Amino acid sequence: MLRHEDGQWHRPLGALTPDITATTSAIDKIIVQDLAWIVSALLELLELRRGVPAEGRMAALPAMIKYGVGSPAACYASSIGIRDRATATNLAANCPYPEPTLRQFLDWLSQLTTDEITTLTDPDTARLLIRSTERRSPRATQAAILSGAGTFTCPLRGVRHSGNDATLAQLPAGAPLDLVRDPGNEADPNAIQVQHQGVFLGWIAREVARPPARSRVGPRPRIYTQLATDARSIAQQSGADQLHVHNAVTLTVMLAPR
């Protein structure tokens, strides 16, 4: 900034020897924070004043500015810790959904095997993605059940036998579910049914159902369950029969102390 003294304009001494680090930080703040916020505010004003809601790529524009990538899926990749823009863009390009939601993108990542993750990206990113899916491991499941607190993912079994796969085929990722004990089950007295608004969809995996069913120590935790897999997208793209495939549908189970 120039200052006026003795009828002349003078440049501050600091501007004659600029700090490149400070300049870079200032530019980064303007682009990453301020510009993204301004665009977000403009989109909200457009909807408020003109009744035109931002959709698709337009809705993701503030995030694309913030992360410096060119698609919503690449924004999702950046948001889970992938800092390199080229890596985030390349990973997003492999997502099978044309324009995935965040839930669809995360669901796709959760279904990848370790070998697939290693093939799709660089070693550092692969380690990040593999660590992010560790909660699906038996050790993470057991730890959450024994402590009565935590989050884990487990398969939905018996979809074909439930006879209600048409209902499951209408449910997106995040749909709330209920766990209901099934003591009359002849095959497994520890069985726990999975229901949506009273409609039976299947059972949680036997190895997951057994520990909480047998536990009689301490207060039972609060249990929140939702669909982790986007069953609706699978049914629309590949047919409802794909929901019968072993471990094709998974649930997210959250345990919280009472």
Image: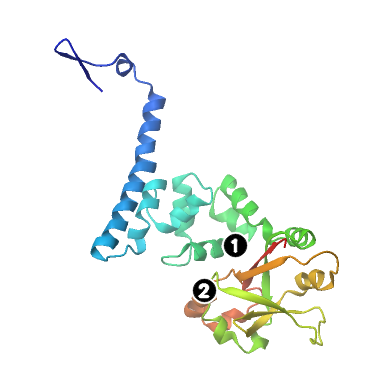
State which quadrant residue 117 falls in: bottom right
Q: Is residue 18 above or below residue 163?
A: above
Residue 70, position as x, y percentages in the image: 37, 53
Looking at the rendered structure, the kind of residue marked 2 is: Pro
- The Cα–Cα distance between marks 2 and 1, rounded to whole angstroms, is 15 Å
Q: Which mark is residue 110?
A: 1
**Residue at 32 percent of width and 62 percent of height:** 54
The residue nearer to you, when weighing 141 against 133, is 141
Residue at the disc numbered 2: 172
Q: How is the image coloured?
A: rainbow
Q: Secondary structure at mark 2?
A: loop
Q: Quadrant of residue 178?
A: bottom right
| Closest to the observer, 54 or 115 | 54
Q: Which tag, 2 or 1, sits closer to the chain's start?
A: 1
Label 1 is placed on what type of residue?
Answer: Ser
The residue sitting at 72% across, 59% down in the picture is 149
**x, y percent for residue 87:** 48, 48
Q: Residue at x 26, y 59 (%)?
A: 46
For the residues labelled 2 and 1, say whether their Cβ atoms are less than 8 Å apart. Answer: no
- Identify the image quadrant of the N terminus: top left
Secondary structure category for the residue under label 1: helix
Q: Count neighbours of disc 1 (C-alpha within 10 A) and say few if under 14, some if 14 to 19, many if 20 or more.
A: some
Q: Residue at x 40, y 26 (%)?
A: 22
| Residue situated in front as seen by the camera: 31 or 97 | 31
From the viewer's perspective, tell me whether residue 81 is left or right of residue 75: right
Disc 2 vs disc 1: which is toward the camera?
Answer: 2
Q: Which mark is residue 92?
A: none
Residue 186, x across and y down, in percent: 82, 88
Residue 8 drawn above or below residue 242 = above
Q: Quadrant of residue 139?
A: bottom right
